[in-house]
Every structure is written in C-alpha cells, then in structure tokens.
Image (cartoon, grey):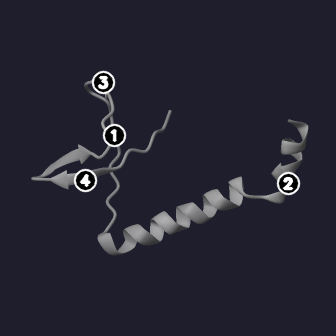
Amino acid sequence: MIKTLWATVRQGKIELIDSTELPEGTRVLVTLFPDDEAEFWLQASQNSLNAVWNNAEDDVYSQLL
C-alpha cells in the first residue's frame, strides 16, 4: 500500500510531521517540493479531490440511505 507522509528536513535529517510507526528497513521515496511550488501542488491536489468528492452524480447515493 502506498501512503503519503509529510515531513521536513531539520539539521540534515528527514523528520515526519505526524508520528507514525515505520518498521526498520522500510523503503521510502522522497519527493522534494521547492517552497515556491508547494502551494501550487497543494492547491492542484485539492482541486482534484473536490472534483471527485463534490459532484452531483454521487447525490443519488445519499437518497438510498
């Protein structure tokens, strides 16, 4: 399962923002976000999520509940 975790670099080490248990030897992929592009990518992701979660087609399911 792929899971995204946010982290920052402090004194040359990657520190997770939210604590989580990672087994020793867990392989990770690190993607660097330049500060000036981070807001762009966060907004782009939010727009995609809004398109998936906020749509009229899903309203039919609320009628079934």
> Which quadrant, please, contains the C terminus?
top right
Name the N-terminal-most of marks 2 and 1.
Answer: 1
Q: Residue at x 90, y 37 (%)?
A: 64
Label placed on residue 8: 4
Please identify, in this view, whether the residue under mark 1 or under mark 4 is nearer the observer.
4
Q: Residues within 10 Å of mark 1 (few under 14, many from 20)?
A: few
Which residue ends up furthest to the left in the rendered image?
11
How far apart are the two marked residues, 2 and 1, measured between alpha carbons? 37 Å
Please identify, in this view, whether the residue under mark 1 or under mark 3 is nearer the observer.
3
Q: Position of residue 1 (x, y in %)?
A: 50, 32
Please identify, in this view, whether the residue under mark 3 or under mark 4 is nearer the observer.
4
* Residue named by callout 2: 57
SS category of the residue bearing label 4: strand
Label placed on residue 23: 3
SS category of the residue bearing label 3: loop
How far apart are the two marked residues, 3 and 2, measured between alpha carbons? 41 Å
Name the N-terminal-most of marks 3 and 4.
Answer: 4
Q: Position of residue 55 (x, y in %)?
A: 78, 58
Which residue ends up furthest to the top in the rendered image?
23
Name the N-terminal-most of marks 1 and 4.
Answer: 4
Asked whether disc 2 touches disc 1, contact meaning CB atoms under 8 Å apart, the reply is: no
Name the N-terminal-most of marks 2 and 4.
Answer: 4
Q: Position of residue 9 (x, y in %)?
A: 20, 54
Label placed on residue 28: 1
Q: Residue at x 54, y 67 (%)?
A: 44
Q: Residue at x 35, y 45 (%)?
A: 29
How far apart are the two marked residues, 1 and 4, measured between alpha carbons? 14 Å
Please identify, in this view, whether the residue under mark 3 or under mark 2 is nearer the observer.
2
Asked whether disc 1 touches disc 4, contact meaning CB atoms under 8 Å apart, the reply is: no
